[in-house]
């Protein structure tokens, strides 16, 4: 039985969680000292902060000028639910899912809204074939499957002249992948992902066609205040200028602003994407030379550059789930990777977050530790 050697170098920051994700490099709570604490979010200063968050989001993500951007309650889930409950039911629906969050939206639409939707699913590691999708229906999908490490490669298969709306949960994609806004009518994300912000606040981006739907269609079901985006058949424009539906945390707003300014100084979206790409490449270069670990994503064209999911493939492994858990636990105990186990509903393995706030040097330093933990657990199996 070989004794595994601990690697010489440790990641400087062991936070590889897929949400909440690592804060921006060098983050310190004193960076939030300009937060207007104890002031109303409807005061001049409060409204200015919220408007700045919207403006910087538009600038960095390159959101078209005629798309609305709103800060909404309940994180990405809140933003998606607002869209589903407000927009669906006007025309037939297709639901696409390739991992647990996408499946959650299927459940919502089929079991809660009770819509007779066409559902297309792909197994973990794969994506549904967009060639089969009818974009004259409303289509709901997740851009990046956070729990499967598989993403939509681009918007090429979404027709520009579609009759339906495309509703896209982009929470682990925004700020890390190019989102083709001309092909997307609703885009949602939360602050806690790629920019390392805080939970509880969502962002909802609407195309002019989505707004047109909101103003011309009233769903058959009741609409709680927290989801309501129209009044008297007109869009409540204030929501998209920073007049939030209810009270946001101005501390979280400040934190998001600090992250947006970090992103802006870095060079914006392209620089953020480059950082994620470099992080994911560091993992894929490592696993390419190992025969005991593999990417859960089957096709490199759809492999994520944020939530990289790995599975152990060694024939000596006796209980796959227990083995993967033990490796993740060992990495955590060594203090080299926190929260790096696969998502509870996903196939057993590891999930290493590679968003822009992660340093490539930390990803590279983690790789030998994964090998170490793997060997140690093989030995421990007896
Ligand atoms: C694809 C996807 N959708 C939705 C969510 C839920 O996000 P939140 O907890 O910010 O509402 C997550 C969280 O990880 C996610 O990865």
Image: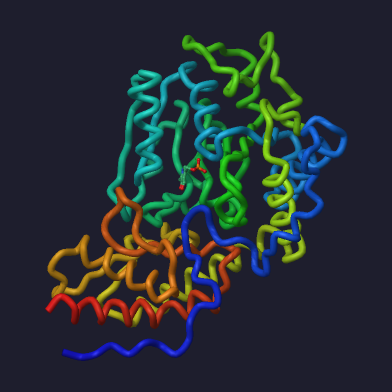
Q: Residue at x 68, y 40 (%)?
A: 249
* Displayed quadrant of residue 203: top right
For the question of whether residue 183 can be seen, the reply is: no
Residue closer to the observer: 9 or 352: 9
The answer to whether residue 289 is above or below residue 191 is below
> Where residue 235 appears, x then y in whole percent?
69, 19
**Quadrant in which the C terminus appears:** bottom left
Residue 322 location, x and y as percent? 21, 63
Nearer to me, 190 or 159: 190
Q: How many marks?
A: 0
Q: Residue at x 40, y 19 (%)?
A: 113
Question: Does 74 sit left or right of 101 as displayed?
Answer: right
The reply to whether residue 56 is visible in this rendering is yes
Q: Residue at x 69, y 56 (%)?
A: 259
Q: Nearer the viewer, residue 150 or 292?
A: 292
Residue 283 drawn at (x, y percent):
43, 73
Q: Is residue 130 above or below residue 300?
A: above
Q: Position of residue 321 (x, y in %)?
A: 22, 60
Horizontal side of 105 relative to 191 (left or right) equals left
């Amino acid at each position: 039985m070989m004794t595994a050697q601990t690697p010489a170098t440790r990641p400087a920051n062991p936070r590889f969680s897929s949400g909440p994700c690592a804060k921006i490099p060098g983050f310190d709570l004193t960076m939030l000292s300009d937060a207007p604490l104890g002031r109303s979010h409807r005061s001049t200063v409060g409204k200015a902060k919220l408007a700045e968050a919207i403006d910087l989001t538009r600038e960095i993500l390159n959101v078209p000028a005629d798309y609305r951007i709103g800060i909404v309650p309940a994180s990405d889930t809140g933003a998606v639910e607002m869209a589903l409950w407000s927009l669906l039911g006007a025309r037939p629906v297709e639901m696409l899912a390739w991992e647990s969050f996408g499946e959650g939206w299927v459940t919502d639409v089929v079991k809660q809204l009770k819509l007779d939707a066409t559902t297309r699913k792909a197994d973990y590691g794969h994506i549904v074939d967009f060639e089969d999708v009818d974009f004259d229906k409303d289509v709901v999908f997740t851009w990046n499957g956070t729990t499967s490490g598989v993403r939509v490669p681009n918007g090429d298969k979404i027709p520009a002249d579609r009759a339906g709306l495309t509703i896209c949960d982009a929470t682990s994609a925004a700020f890390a992948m190019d989102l083709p806004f001309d092909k997307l009518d609703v885009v949602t994300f939360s602050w806690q992902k790629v920019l390392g912000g805080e939970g509880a606040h969502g962002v909802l981006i609407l195309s002019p066609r989505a707004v047109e739907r909101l103003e011309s269609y009233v769903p058959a079901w009741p609409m709680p205040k927290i989801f309501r985006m129209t009044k008297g058949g007109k869009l409540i424009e204030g929501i998209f200028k920073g007049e939030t539906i209810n009270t946001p945390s101005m501390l979280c707003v400040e934190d998001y602003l600090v992250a947006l300014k970090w992103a802006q100084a870095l060079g914006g979206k392209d620089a953020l994407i480059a950082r994620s790409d470099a992080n994911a490449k560091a993992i894929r270069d490592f696993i390419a030379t190992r025969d005991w670990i593999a990417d859960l994503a089957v096709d490199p064209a759809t492999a994520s550059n944020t939530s990289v999911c790995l599975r152990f493939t060694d024939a000596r492994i006796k209980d796959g789930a227990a083995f993967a858990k033990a490796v993740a636990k060992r990495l955590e105990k060594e203090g080299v990777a926190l929260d790096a186990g696969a998502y509870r509903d996903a196939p057993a393995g590891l999930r290493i977050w590679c968003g822009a706030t992660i340093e490539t040097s930390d990803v590279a330093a983690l790789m030998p530790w994964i090998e170490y933990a793997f060997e140690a657990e093989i030995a421990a199996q007896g």
